[in-house]
Amino acid sequence: MMTRRTWLALLIAAGLTWTAGVQSAAAQGKHVVVFAAASLKNALDDIAGQWQRETGKKAVISYAASNTLIKQIEQGAPADIFISADLDWMDYGQQKNLIKPDSRFSLLGNRLVLIAPKDSSVSANIQPGFDLATLLKGGRLAMGNVDAVPAGKYGKAALEKLGVWDSVKDKIAQALGIVYQTDAAADPGVKIVGIFPENTHPPIIYPVALTKESTNPDAQMFLNYLRSPAARAAFERQGFTVLAPGGQRS
């Protein structure tokens, strides 16, 4: 059975992420406040801990869907750094003058995979026209909101490219699921049954930037630290691809 964590990641029922701790940290101006895509949690928690041990400074991180986070920033939530799971929501932040464009860069890449419960016998060779509807066996397909959440948008794009979207679009909810490879790797209750070819969806890129309203000098330090060898190792342990300057896979 898939764990609650994975289904929450799939469905991205991302409600209030502006916690009391984040609010307090921002009000005091003592800590770096980071709003980050939910799929980054394991890696960023490790990185923030390493940074604190090395510098004595603290990063307070709030996780949710990228669209939820940028909307909160737009409404005045006090973040210093925004890390999105796709380019669209960072572009939105730039268009709305919510980030500092000169600070922006593409940090990470990811893969899109099809998962099933650990005890499932399902396997899939994902290629154009593969019979996903039959694989579901009357069940449902779990994925994020295809109109807003990055993983959902990537998933829909891949299924459309493969010519199978119309056969499963009315079966979105459970049984099999489409998630990031890093989310699947972090959950012992699931297994990867197929990997979507990278040419079936837009590149999965995680851009990062300082927010327009950030005045905390430590925010730039943390941003720089995200490209340190220690941070790179933490990201790679979780299965992310660390992008070289310029957004290319390194």
Image (tube, rainbow, N blue to C red):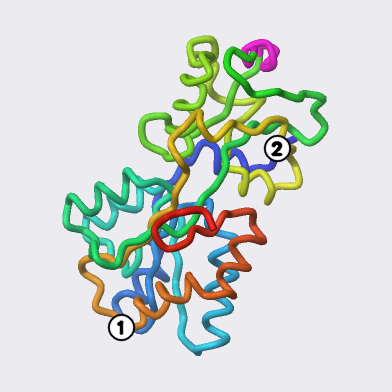
Residue 185 magenta: no
Residue 57 visible in the shown view: yes
Q: Please give the residue where the numbered disc 2 appears in the rendered image.
A: 2
Residue 23 x, y percent position in the rendering: 34, 69
- Say if 149 sits above or below 125 in the image: below
Q: Is residue 153 left or right of residue 104?
A: right
Whether 22 is drawn above or below 118: the answer is below
Q: Does residue 17 appear in the picture of this structure?
A: no
Label 2 crowd (10 A; few <14 / some 14-19 / many >=20): many
Q: Position of residue 122 (x, y in %)?
A: 77, 23
> Quadrant location of residue 138?
top right
Of the 4 image quadrants, the one containing the C terminus is: bottom right
Kind of residue at disc 1: Pro
Name the spot of residue 42 as percent of width and height, x first: 60, 60
Quote the CA–CA distance across marks 2 and 1: 42 Å
Q: Secondary structure at mark 1?
A: helix
Main secondary structure found in the magenta portion: helix
Q: Earlier in the sequence, mark 2 or mark 1?
A: 2
